[in-house]
Image (cartoon, rainbow, N blue to C red):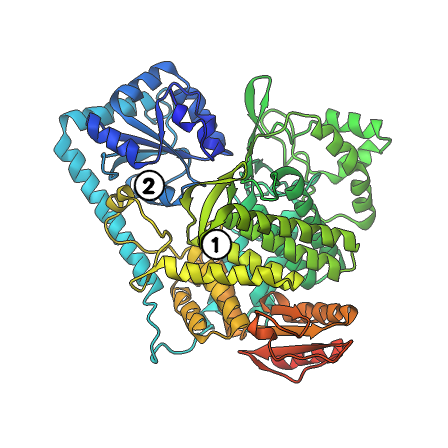
Amino acid sequence: MAERLRNQASAYLRQHADNPVDWWPFSEEAFAEARRRNVPVFISVGYAACHWCHVMAHESFEDAATAQYLNEHFVSVKVDREERPDVDAVYMAATQALTGQGGWPMSVFTLPDGRTFYAGTYFPPRQLQGMPSFQQVMEAVSSAWRDRPAEVEASAAQIAAHLASAQAGNRRLIGSLEVTAESGPLSGEVLEAAVEAVLEQEDQRFGGLGGAPKFPPSPLLRFLLVYGSTDRPAAGAAASVADRTLETMARSGLYDQLEGGFARYTVDRAWAIPHFEKMLYDNAQLLRLYAHWSRSAPSEDQRHLALQVSADTAAWLAKRLRVEGGGFASSLDADTLVDGHRREGATYVWTPDELRTVLSDSGADADAVLSLLDLETGRMEAGGSTLHFGRSLQPEEEQLWQRVRPALLAVRDRRPQPDRDDKVVAGWNGLAIAGLADAALALDDAGDPGEKAAGLLDLARDAADYLLRVHYRNGLLARVSHAGTAAGIEGLLEDYAGAAEGLFALFAATGEEQWYRKAEELVLAAEQRFIVDGVLQDTAVRTDQLAAAQGSLSAADPMDGPTPSGTALFAGVLVTYAAYSGSSRHRALAEALLSHVQLVAARAPRAGGWAMSVLVQALEGPRELAVTGSDPRLVRQLLRTGRAAGGPAVVVASGSGGETAVPLLRDRPAPDGGALAYLCRGMVCSRPVADPEELAAQFRTLNS
């Protein structure tokens, strides 16, 4: 029945191709069919790695009787929230307005014009603890549509008006993008209050922020690391929260201690039991954060831990998520298919007896290894446990663990493995490129073998080449691809800005100017595509159904989720581009996009982390480091010094000193056979130096 889904780019949609439900992808044709039949539309939103999405699919969408009722009374639309975040955002807002909560799977009932009149999340096949069954919901919705059309219309109009009001709120939050003489300079005073708010939210017992479920606060951690690298008020407190959170996560069940890579979140406060799905967007950000932390962590053990986590997470990306051609897939499933049944986390959990067998066979002291692990806190209902420590390891304990990891991983690799969602998302791949580039630099600067750093740069180059070759055509960036072919909608603001972020980072790491030129193209294209009549929008092209669902107004949502908002990402690449190009117009546009930080920093710091980090970078100048010359050894020394002294906020460019497309490098000559470093702010530079110690001293002067 669901043949329309069989060749979709989304693995989530393809998973439903054999359902008896007559699914449609989100399209004008689906809503036209609802108008023709005069029936409401049922929109089911989820994603491939979602455990409860699989549960509802098995219970309801694979059930012949349920499917028959859906097919007779509705046009059914299946949406991958990762492929269509524009659709997900609109109907999630409607669901939250109606129920006070949201989540996936999301179940939404709309008029044929796209306006919501009823919504919820997971519905069980039978009434359960006061929750209606899905059959009861379908019957009630169908009855209302047939017998009470005026009430349905009134409900849909009310919800659409509410969502339109939220869009107007986003417009007010971002403010005007018209820069005037009265706009005034940026202020960072609110950032200290943001740090104080974070300190109040920190879990003093288990680390991280808040209680269960516990998520990695990646955009916020970026702010804490960037702010902590400055001499601003509360910088020490910010750095300390980042130190504690990053170390705790690295020792916890959130992190895969055998292979690397982070799960989406843990269901418990103690970081012991993960929800086992692994997302590219989480791991791309965390890879980069641990690379940055390896430079600033206060102890040698922590710096070593940061490098280990960064290197292992990069290796996990290459092993598990890399697709043919060099891009990275979206996720690994939370569930594993074992004997015909989906079991959450089945690949990853161990019983003590399983551990003893493997350890004994490998010649290890099983008791000594088991004493390292907190198996009790990580115990799941079926009796297996996640492998995590819950504490810092002594050097000899760390050595023991590294010796037994390969044997345990080899056994785990022979188990059934979770499915992978192979669709490639442009913005998330941009974040992965940035993470790989920065991890390569961190490893190289720390003196790790050059082959490892070079390998990560090759992975970043391959992913960048894939994006530009597959996703970027005629000045437009596609959001997703599958099997090497772009499909679906144009990229969103987060895709253009995320891809530019990755390409700028790759240029900073390699000095290869083709990455700078393409990043510049994406920034300029985003400016043209997503600023309409002075208003920033998340989408360049909006469907009629979404316009009806939230009114005619449209504005970008500047608040971070697990990924940075498109607004924050765009502001960041504008600051970077202005630093490279000297464009005061783009610098002013970035500052205008950061105005919402004044309102959200202290009230909701976890929703403004990336924008706050960009604000710090802008307040710092940002610092610009141009290194030119033909002596590769000295160029490398100067760049290492600059990265170490400048922190995450420094903008770096390197070149030969000849013809260049990068304005920051122009008119920066170097002596034959030598190299010079130019430390600048706003293209105004200090005296060029060839001595790394002198460069470090210039940074110290700039900081004072």
| Residue 7 at x, y percent in the picture | 45, 29
Q: Amino acid at mark 1?
A: Pro
Looking at the image, the residue that sits furthest to the top is: 65
| Left or right side of 318 for 108 | left
The residue nearer to you, when weighing 231 against 379, is 231
Residue at figure coordinates x 66%, y 46% from the top left: 313
Residue at figure coordinates x 66%, y 69% from the top left: 654
Q: Is residue 152 above or below residue 662?
A: above
The residue nearer to you, when weighing 576 against 380, is 576
| Residue 437 at x, y percent in the picture | 64, 56
**Do callouts 2 and 1 mark residues in contact (Cβ within 8 Å)?**
no
Looking at the image, the residue that sits furthest to the left is: 150
Q: Amino acid at mark 2?
A: Tyr
Q: Which mark is residue 91?
A: 2
Looking at the image, the residue that sits furthest to the right is: 363
| Residue 640 at x, y percent in the picture | 72, 67
The answer, for residue 196, to whether it is visible in the render is no
The Cα–Cα distance between marks 2 and 1, rounded to whole angstroms, is 20 Å
Q: Is residue 19 above or below residue 600?
A: above
Quarter the N terminus occupies? top left
- Mark 1 residue element: loop
In primary-sequence order, the first of circles 2 and 1 is 2
Residue at figure coordinates x 64%, y 71% from the top left: 646
Q: Please identify the quarter of the rendering in which residue 127 is found.
A: top left
Q: How many marks?
A: 2
Residue ID for mark 1? 564
